[in-house]
Amino acid sequence: MPRVRMEGTALKSWDEVNLNLKEIAECELKLEAIEADMNTKIQDLKLAAEMEAKQYHDRIAKLAQEIKEYTETHRDEIKGKTKSLNFGFVGFRQSTKIIIRNVQAVITALKARGMTDCIQVKEAVLKDKLKDYPDDVIVAVGAGKKVEDTFWYETDREKLKTA
C-alpha cells in the first residue's frame, strides 16, 4: 500500500504504534482479498454477458450488412440523403478523412506553408523539473516552492504474513 499522511495521535507508546500498524496491515490484506474476489466476480459476469450478447451482436451485424447491400443496390430510389422507414432510417452521408502516413513530414510542410492553425501544440509546466532550480529562479518565473514536513506510514505486510 502507498504511504499515508496523518495528523494528530491518541497513542501513548511505540508499542501501541506498532500494534496499530499491524492492525492496518491486517485490514489492508483483507481489503485486497475482498477486491480480488470482487474483480474475479466482475470478470466472470463480463464474460457471461459477452457470451450471452454475442448472438445478438452477430445477428445485428448480419442484418445491418443485408440492409447496407440492399440500400446500395437501390440507392437511386432514395430522394435526398435519407430514406425514412417505419422502423428507422437508411441513407448515405458524405464522410471526409485525412490520411497521414508521415506525421513529422506533414507538420514540417504545414509549418513551411504557414498553416500553424493545423498544428496542435500542448504546453505544460514540468513541476518536477522546475523544483530542481534555485528558489530565486523559481520566484523569478512567477512560481513558488512550498516545503513541508509531512507524516507518513507504511505497513510491512510480509512480516505479518510470516508471523
Image: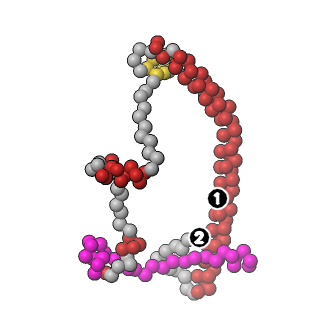
Question: How many residues crowd mark 2 within 10 Å: few (<14), some (14–19), many (20+)?
Answer: few
- Outermost residue, top side: 77
Q: Nearer the viewer, residue 136 or 150?
A: 136
Numbered tag placed on residue 96 in the rendering: none
> Which quadrant of the figure contains the N terminus?
bottom right
Q: How is the image coloured?
A: secondary structure
Q: What span is colored magenta in the figure?
A: 136-163
Q: Residue furthest right?
A: 162
Instruction: Tell me the quarter of the picture where residue 96 sits.
Output: top left
Q: Residue at x 49, y 74 (%)?
A: 5
Could you tell me if residue 146 is visible in this image?
no
Across and down, in percent, residue 25 comes to 64, 73
Amino acid carrying mark 2 in the image: Met
Quadrant in which the C terminus is drawn:
bottom right
129 with respect to 9 (left or right): left
**Which residue was labeled with disc 1?**
35
Element class at badge 2? loop
Q: Which mark is residue 1?
A: 2
Q: Is residue 61 above or below residue 14?
A: above
